[in-house]
Amino acid sequence: MPAEDTPMHTTDQSTTNPMVTSTNPPTHHMNTDSRVNKRNRPASPAPVTNPHPDTNPGQTPNQNQTPAVKAPASKWPNIERPPQQPTAPNQWDFLRSNAPPTPEVSVNGVRTLDSGFRITATPTGGFPTPQLGQSTWHNVSQILKEKWPQKEGAKAWVHTYRAKHESNAQSTVAKLKDAITKIIGDSDAESLVVSTPTAAVELIERLPPPWHFLISGIPPEAIKRLVRLQVCSSPEISCFFVPFEQPLPTYALTLENFSFPDSDATNKAIVEIVKDTIQSNPDILQYIHENIPFPDAEAALRTIELVRVSSLNLAHSKTMKETVWNVYFESPPNFTLKQYFDWTNLLRTFFYISEDYGYGTATKMTNSCA
């Protein structure tokens, strides 16, 4: 990630329509378009006020880790195989509450809150987990990078569907504040602040960043409620709530242009194409070994072997539909956020070639969730 996208004091969204369907709905994730960016942040049940958003002082690299699947020895003959290092836990587990979920009452897919606010009901298996393909700080002005982390109390990010930077965001802020107030209640929203991002530079893009507004001034439990809700889709506004401390994503890229049919067999075939492409490009593997904090000859193996692919069916119009494939690394390297985004940007430069179904290329990232 460029230096201008990192707050001075720290150490270190492609939005898909919520109506998009997939072959594996319960396991889909939402991925926010972007390119390069930031570092591993702590995965805690509640956003914290640590002014260093990219630092996790309470966790060592190997804490709470579980063994990963090994690749067959014959498949990677040139990679040394010492005693295996454990893999990192799923950093999005903080979204899961130990308490039983409160049953939702919905009619025809619409949930009416106590305030009377009508939103799309949570689908079976939950909404896809929002994962950012780029830092929340991307193209945020330097003064805000310095001031926002210093805000007292719990904080979270919110971005709208197909978000783009607005020089005058008065209408958007009013809609966001109204929706948040109706979700958390008038008493908790008494001191609610929705801060508007200002751009470091003017970018000529279809959906230029910065995309994220900062939520503050409300109790930690209210922040938790928003982040666990994840998605608010109403007639007035559709938005996504993201924790202030950004976890390391497992989403890497989205492939398009294949002529594959949409099926589980296709997903498995693309997994093998991704593995073969990575194996045949030593720069990808070398980047892992040069940037992980501790020597680990099996880090690349674990990353490659735990690739997952899920298809998404996109309806561009009533008559035009397209299937794309999201690629995830369930055991990502122990990178900072910036290193991870730089690495996935490298993955987006390759052609993923099939013998019979053409070649896949990475989609150009705008602001989205996967």
Image (tube, helix red, strand yellow):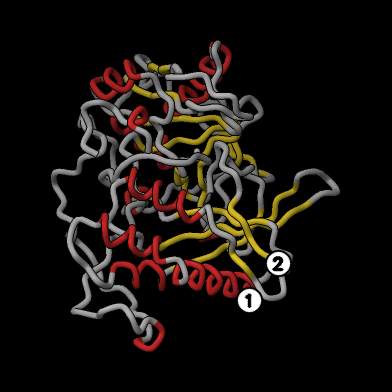
- Residue at figure coordinates x 28%, y 39% from the top left: 46
Q: Which residue is mark 1?
A: 265
Callout 1 secondary element? helix
Q: Which residue is mark 2?
A: 358
Is 54 or 196 nearer to us in this picture?
Answer: 54
Quadrant housing residue 90:
bottom left
Depicted 16 relative to depicted 80: above or below = above
Is 314 or 291 nearer to us in this picture?
Answer: 291
Name which of mark 1 and mark 2 comes first in the sequence.
1
Would you call the spot at circle 2 few (<14 residues within 10 Å), some (14-19), or many (20 or more)?
few
Between the residue at mark 1 and the residue at mark 2, the CA separation in whole angstroms equals 16 Å
Q: Is residue 222 visible?
A: no
Depicted 51 relative to depicted 290: above or below = above
Q: Is residue 286 visible?
A: yes
Would you call the spot at circle 1 few (<14 residues within 10 Å), some (14-19), or many (20 or more)?
few
- Residue at figure coordinates x 75%, y 48% from the top left: 315
Task: Kindly identify the amino acid type of the residue bearing the numbered disc 2.
Answer: Gly
Q: In this figure, what is the number of numbered marks?
A: 2
Quadrant housing residue 163:
top right
